[in-house]
Amino acid sequence: MPTNFTLGNDLSGQRILLNPANWSSDVSSGASQSAVLGLKVSQGPAYASFSFRTETSAQPVASAHHAVSGVRQELFGGQLFEKIIVIPRVKALGFVLSDTQFGVEVWNSFRDSHQTLQAINIGGDGGLTVANPYGLPLLFPALDSFTYQATVPRFGTAQIAQDVVFVFVSGIGGADMQVTGARITLFSIAPDWNEGMEETFEFLTDVLRAYSDNEQRRGLRQLPRRAMRYRALTLNARDAAGMESLIWGWQNQPYGVPWWPDAQPLLSDVAIGTFVIPVDTADRQFAVGGLLAIWVDEYTFEALNITAVAAHSVTCSSPTQFAWKAGPGTRVMPVFLCRLPASVDISRHSSEIDQVDLNFIGEAGQAAPAPTTSPAQFKGYDVLEIAPNWEKTPLKRSYKRSLVTIDPKVGPIQVIDKGGTAVVGQEFPWWLDTHPNVTIFRAFMLRRFGQLTPFWTPTWDQDLVLFQDVLSTDSGIRIKSEFYTRFFFPTPARRFVAFIPVDGSGNVYGKITAAADNGDGTETLTLETPTGKNFAKGSTMVSFLTLARLASDSIAIRWDSSEHAESILELQEVPRELP
């Protein structure tokens, strides 16, 4: 039987024996030693003293063992070692408009062995080159790295898809890099500002109209398609040949087209290898993920990808390849991707003078600044408070009713008014002076998403003529009689009004809740709430406030210069959607 361990004596003087249950009984020989622990408890302070002795037994000793195989498990980060690491492994260049450089680090992460580079192999299309100042073969000591400079030229195939393989004598794999991108050609011909320039952005809306003229609209495009139209004019043989060469060689590919109205001077000199371009960006369409161009003339320019936009600078994803001097002669502009149509007509007035009307069609899904305007609100809808321009063209208004005429050719004619009221269409021309005002107008229109989102707009007519002044606490107004109570008030679409002071001190909007014809050439209109502001009858225009949407998904802004523009838009009233 197995030997017991002795653990001193209990309080009665008997020995305490422990039987080791984990011993096996199939061992026929051996010896064991028992440890005896003596426990002695004394009076006084609580303490215990222990003494040990050994006893030898001739009983066999049982043994147990296991065959366990071990593996080497690296701690966090250990998988980085014992390989060749190329940084970056994948390089997506995006759009390449000028020579683009980036660094490539090759790291020998073997901790105990050197590696020897014997070749750098480049495959695919794109024209990429890797500068190797170290020569070949090159010894990479353990845990050491070398950095190479890769360059992709602006000229070459439209699509860039290349592999760079660093070949080592040991034959280790994974030491490679993939480079992708799309090469874009900058259409560097400046517009002829005598003819102006037109920008267009277009959404796509599905308008479903019911029998009663109610509408359901679905926006099908989150980002608008942008377009640009202008006339280019060259006045010497070199420029004329250069423009025709651009059209000849790249008409089937997208161009990078500078957004000329947003051109800004370079604020300070830029050296070669600079990532941050000093330029004022307020009210300009520089956007993260977009492009910019630094431009001097048709043949002197550089284009870069944008990674960050600040108030007075733009950060690019790659460094400049040229040095640039500050001043108005060096302009910085946003760039949009556009295509020319399949047919382009060039008028040659002499051997040196070419003229062409360019209609650039924007590529889909391009980055542009999000609208940041905060327009006035009335009952949950934006209010367009920019007054139209009366100078060049009269304001047009059309009244359309959904009528069904039943004419049996004999007997009475029956006419059914499906909608019950006229749907009014209005055409407004706007004159937009200064670049910030153009930005506000564009931002407001971008918030419409084409025909999708309605908004309030005054008719900008003297629709109601005040008979007396309006005080801030008045609960109603008195107007000169114009059949408002009989014809307009029964229709909810003509119960909303705008009080517009001629001094531009701020409009007030309200709702008419009751109307009465006084029989003396005046009518009294009750307001939902007082105006809270005094309005003199001789210097206040009271217009109907109409809820309308854009009649088209396309919005055009025509620039006369970089600081002045105009736009003509057609609006359609949506009287069934009044709050």
Image (cartoon, helix red, strand yellow):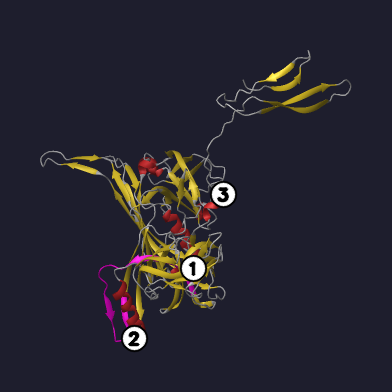
Q: Secondary structure at mark 1?
A: strand
Q: Is residue 256 magenta?
A: no
Q: Residues within 10 Å of mark 2 (few under 14, many from 20)?
A: few
Image spot of residue 202 (x, y percent):
35, 57
- Residue 227, by quadrant, is bottom left
Q: Earlier in the sequence, mark 1 or mark 2?
A: 1
- What residue lies at 76% left-to-right and 28% top-to-bottom? 53
Q: Secondary structure at mark 2?
A: helix
**Left or right: 9, with 287 as reference point:** right
Vertical arrangement, residue 29 with respect to residue 448, above or below: above
Tag of residue 116: 1
Image spot of residue 444 (x, y percent):
45, 55
Q: Verify CB contact (< 8 Å) between mark 3 and mark 2.
A: no
- Residue located beneath label 3 in the image: 76
Q: Amino acid at mark 2?
A: Ala
Foreground disc of the pair 1, 3 = 1
Q: Which residues are magenta?
A: 331-356
- Residue located beneath label 2 in the image: 237
Q: Is residue 338 magenta?
A: yes
Vertical arrangement, residue 174 with respect to residue 98, above or below: above
Q: Verify CB contact (< 8 Å) between mark 1 and mark 2.
A: no
Q: Earlier in the sequence, mark 3 or mark 2?
A: 3
Q: Residues within 10 Å of mark 1 (few under 14, many from 20)?
A: some
Gap in Å between the C-alphas at discs 3 and 2? 66 Å
The count of marks equals: 3
Foreground disc of the pair 1, 2 = 1
State the quadrant of the N terminus: top right
- What residue lies at 40% left-to-right and 71% top-to-bottom? 128
